Image: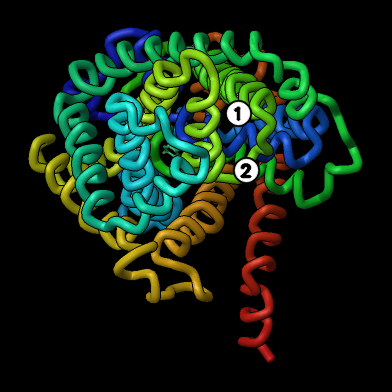
């Protein structure tokens, strides 16, 4: 089977891999999306459903991705070629995942650029001595400014390039070992601050008190969809990171740790954010508004807020950085493994492409505001729609079906047994065969229906 594995780079330590994979999983999705959707969809009831989605769908697929990578020691496309053959149809999930990584890395980096802009504003004291309207207006002026966004997008791309070019041990692993602990310390400080604030009780209630009436079928779909994005599944990242693992690594316990860290950080982020939002009498806004409008207003009104603001935006920037490097690495690995490129050339090419494709995202709310793509959506929203709503679940579904039904020779069983987790095989195998594909297929169906695609497809057959 895998032949080139002797010269293939490997993680230097188990901890290094866990931190890098957790770095990929812990990103903007954890800090601005999870807390908000939890609060909106019934607090504790939603958290419960979310945990179930992670355990029954996310974790089994993450283990499957790590297995494919570790077994073949290849990038996501090469992995399926190695498992099947050069013309095999099964390369499709590989191509879809790498394309998703490409699309997401382009706009993720623009949003990450916003966090850098806010780190800069926090350090230079732009939020102090300003009223709420002025602070909220800063976000509008940032997204109206194409060149400012492009500058930060470029800065962020260069930071990622600088890390990925260093390779697995000296680049990604080394930086994950620095950035992830710092991220954890920053979040812990903000979490303690949240828990000590007068809004702690209200914040805890918002996130945890179970309200089953708010738990609609839509919120279950939201939980499922988010469990995918937050664990970096369907985007070649976990296959690629798995491909640098040693043969005896326990994939079950590694996956469990990564999913555990991801969930813990999402919950801590909510408990850092909501108490202080409620303490100053504000309502939590949705999406980017929560982070880029509400939070700076909150920090301008609480004691020590100017320091907390720096910590908070640094936290976001670090979370985005470790996520984006996994997206870049997933593409770089393809060029190195399948095209025989050197790491330097591959990284510079992917970073340049991601930068260029990110520019229309940076211009989506200014110069290109009138350009619409899919159904009146801006370039940014269209790219996000294609990647998050379609490419990702389709890749996840195909991966689950492949590993559950088509992987020959019981290799998947050997992969679990090799690390000492053979006992979990029957349960995992049942989940990956029946539960995960069914759940992802349902999400996909509803996403397509939501976008009117089912209607469109039905029309084709009339
Ligand atoms: N998991 C990241 C988040 O929650 O923000 C996003 C992400 C990173 C998705 C890397 C996919 C990926 F490969």
Closest to the observer: 23 or 3?
23
Q: Residues within 10 Å of mark 2 (few under 14, many from 20)?
A: some
Snapshot quadrant of residue 261: top right
Instruction: Give the residue displayed 77% in from the left and 34% down from the top.
Output: 46
Question: Can the viewer see residue 406?
Answer: no
Instruction: Give the residue displayed 67% in from the left and 66% down from the top.
Output: 450
Residue 59, numbered circle: 1
Left or right: residue 406 versus residue 23 is right
Quadrant where the C terminus sits is bottom right
Closest to the observer: 369 or 95?
369
Instruction: Give the residue displayed 61% in from the left and 87% down from the top.
Output: 460
Q: Residue furthest bottom?
A: 462
Q: Is mark 1 within 8 Å of ligand 1?
A: no
Residue 323 versus residue 87 in the image, above or below: above
Residue 423 versus residue 140 in the image, above or below: above
- The image position of residue 205, as x and y in percent, is 79, 24
Left or right: residue 75 versus residue 44 is left
Among the two numbered marks 1 and 2 on one chain, the one whose residue lies closer to the N terminus: 1
Snapshot quadrant of residue 226: top right
Residue carrying label 2: 285
Q: Secondary structure at mark 1?
A: helix
Closest to the observer: 46 or 309?
309
């Amino acid at each position: 089977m895998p032949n080139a594995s002797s010269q293939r780079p490997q993680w230097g330590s188990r901890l290094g891999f866990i931190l890098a994979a957790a770095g990929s999983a812990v990103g903007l999705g954890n800090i601005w999306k999870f807390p908000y959707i939890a609060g909106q969809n019934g607090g504790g009831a939603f958290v419960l459903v979310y945990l179930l989605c992670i355990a029954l769908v996310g974790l089994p697929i993450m283990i499957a991705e790590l297995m494919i990578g570790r077994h073949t020691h290849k990038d996501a496309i090469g992995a399926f070629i190695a498992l099947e053959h050069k013309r095999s149809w099964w390369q499709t999930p590989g191509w879809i995942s790498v394309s998703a990584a490409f699309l997401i890395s382009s706009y993720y980096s623009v949003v990450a650029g916003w966090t850098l802009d806010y780190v800069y504003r926090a350090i230079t004291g732009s939020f102090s001595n300003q009223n709420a309207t002025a602070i909220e207006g800063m976000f509008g002026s940032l997204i109206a400014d194409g060149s400012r966004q492009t500058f930060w997008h470029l800065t962020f791309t260069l930071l990622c390039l600088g890390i990925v070019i260093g390779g697995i041990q000296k680049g990604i692993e080394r930086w994950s070992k620095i950035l992830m602990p710092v991220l954890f310390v920053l979040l812990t400080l903000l979490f303690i601050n949240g828990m000590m604030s007068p809004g702690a009780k209200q914040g805890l209630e918002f996130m945890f008190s179970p309200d089953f009436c708010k738990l609609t079928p839509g919120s279950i779909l939201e939980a499922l969809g988010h469990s995918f994005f937050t664990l970096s599944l369907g985007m070649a990242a976990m296959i690629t990171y798995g491909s640098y693992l040693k043969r005896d690594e326990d994939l079950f316990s590694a996956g469990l740790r990564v999913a555990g860290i991801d969930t813990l950080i999402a919950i801590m982020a909510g408990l850092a954010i909501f108490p202080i939002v409620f303490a100053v009498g504000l309502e939590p806004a949705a999406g980017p508004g929560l982070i880029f409008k509400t939070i700076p207003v909150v920090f301008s009104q609480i004691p020590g807020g100017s320091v907390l603001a720096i910590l908070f935006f640094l936290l976001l920037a670090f979370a985005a950085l470790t996520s984006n490097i996994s997206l870049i690495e997933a593409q770089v690995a393809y060029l190195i493994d399948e095209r025989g490129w050197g790491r330097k050339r591959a990284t510079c090419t992917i970073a340049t492409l991601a930068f260029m494709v990110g520019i229309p995202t940076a211009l989506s709310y200014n110069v290109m505001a009138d350009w619409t793509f899919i159904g009146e959506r801006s370039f940014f929203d269209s790219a996000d729609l294609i990647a998050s709503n379609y490419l990702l679940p389709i890749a996840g579904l195909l991966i689950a079906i492949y590993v559950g039904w088509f992987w020959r020779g019981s290799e998947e069983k050997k992969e679990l047994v090799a690390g000492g987790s053979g006992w979990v095989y029957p349960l995992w195998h049942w989940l990956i065969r029946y539960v995960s594909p069914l759940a992802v297929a349902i999400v996909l169906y509803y996403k397509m229906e939501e976008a009117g695609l089912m209607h469109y497809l039905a029309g084709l057959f009339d």
